[in-house]
Image (cartoon, rainbow, N blue to C red):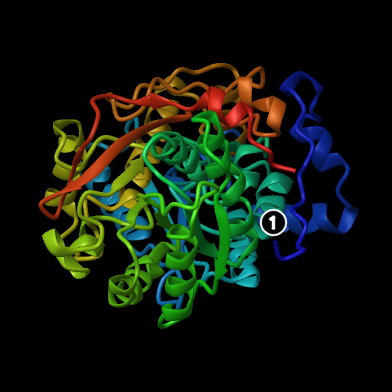
Amino acid sequence: MTGRQRTRSTFLPRFLRPTRPFRFAALSAGALVASASLAAGCGLVPGATGGSGDGSIVVMTWAPEGTAATNKPGMPAFARAYARWVNANGGLNGRKLKVLTCNDHNDTVDAAKCARQAVKADAVAVLGSYSQHSESFLPHLEGAGIPYIGGYGVTNDEFISPLSYPVNGGQPALLAGLGKELAAGCGRVALVRPDTIAGDALPAMLDAGLTAGGHDKAVDQQAAEDATEYSAQADAALKEATAEDESGENGKGCVIPALGDRTGTFMDSFRRGRGDYPTVSTATVLGSVDQTVINSTGGASSAFEGAYVTGWYPVASDPRWDPMKKVISESAFSDTRIDPADTGVQTTWIAYTVFKKVVESLGGGAVTADTVSGALDDGLKVSTGGLTPTLRWEFTDQLASIGFPRLVNANVTLQTVKQGRLAAAKEGFVDVTRTLENADVD
């Protein structure tokens, strides 16, 4: 561990939480004046949809682009394509959807800037976004009462904040599911993960799955998330995975790289060094590996051949993705950033699907940050066409006991790499709720 401490906010059930009028009343007079001036500048009409003054519904999607670490350019690009598509087909309940996008540059300051931009634009929600810096952006959203729907699930705070409405189980579910699957077939397990605050949360989740299957905990190996090569880390992981067990034998070890966009870079180093060691297996999570990474690291001859990969959703070839692919084909205009197999794009599609259902549930009523979060808090059930279980956000959830009260979907899918292609290893979803209940997150 790096010694950094994760800050956990306190979650209260809705009936105990301060109402937004109460929270706003607690703001300083100066902040109230500034808010009033901003509202006047935006031309807002009381009771109308939040936004630009033309009756449109304003939302925002953000993600890092053009950085040396993990990038998700397909998420804001798809959000813009979705807006074009939905507006060409009558809007949301007849209202125009206006999507604002922002680049958080994998930076705490810029993440906060994105959130402030959403507040300034009177966005009614932030949808389908990725950021490692929840400690920077969530306070701004919470202060303005703006819901965060369908975040990528890369930080623990997304499963804690009362204004976060995740659509998947994030990294916790993926790693717990992977550990549970690998427990029976792996010897020593080495996890290679980013040396970041978000990365610090990963070992406990993988260990929860491993121990549920009667396996020892993984060896935690930290690495820079923006390195250009990982020969030293690959060598160390191979040594750990092939070390003798208590019986003096070399078990079939497993190396699990979870480095986001740098996983492919790690695998280049791993492939060059693995010939000096006994055979080991690899496994990882979607988001660190997708079809493009497998292709770039050798396809059927890739070190990922035969590897297990956990994901949140069905494989990209599943027909349940056809509605999303229709949006892409009709409104993306050959934007190469938008890949239907990208889990970021898929998460953004589900987030906008949720938001569409919320707006429809409001009928002709006002669409504001308060009414959107209110509909979700009041128990709205949202079907995503089988891409997830029916979603409903409640405080009385099983995972509140380990500090994740907003983690309402702990289902994962198990995939494997066959002849260089990702394919379903098991039909349907695997629920890792009970596995996560035993995770040591302190």
Q: Position of residue 249 (x, y in %)?
A: 44, 52
Q: Is residue 291 left or right of residue 255?
A: left
**Residue named by callout 1:** 135
Q: Secondary structure at mark 1?
A: helix
Q: Is residue 189 left or right of residue 338?
A: right
Residue 268, by quadrant, is bottom left
Residue 303 image-quadrant placement = bottom left
Q: Is residue 131 visible?
A: yes
User: Amino acid type of disc 1?
Assistant: Glu
Q: Pinpoint residue 315: horizontal percent, then vertical percent.
A: 22, 39
Residue 377 placement (x, y as % from top left): 60, 23
Q: Residues within 10 Å of mark 1 (few under 14, many from 20)?
A: some
Q: Give the number of marks.
A: 1
Quarter holding the C terminus is top right
Q: Which of the image's four quarters has the N terminus? A: bottom right
Task: Tell me residue 374's x, y (percent).
Answer: 60, 25
Residue drawn at x 40%, y 53% is: 253
Instruction: Indicate whether 50 appears above or below 115.
Output: above
* Residue appearing at x 57%, y 67% in the figure: 222
Viewer-nearest residue: 255 or 322: 255
Can residue 96 be spotted in the picture? no
Judging depth in this view, the residue of 385 and 36 nearest the camera is 385
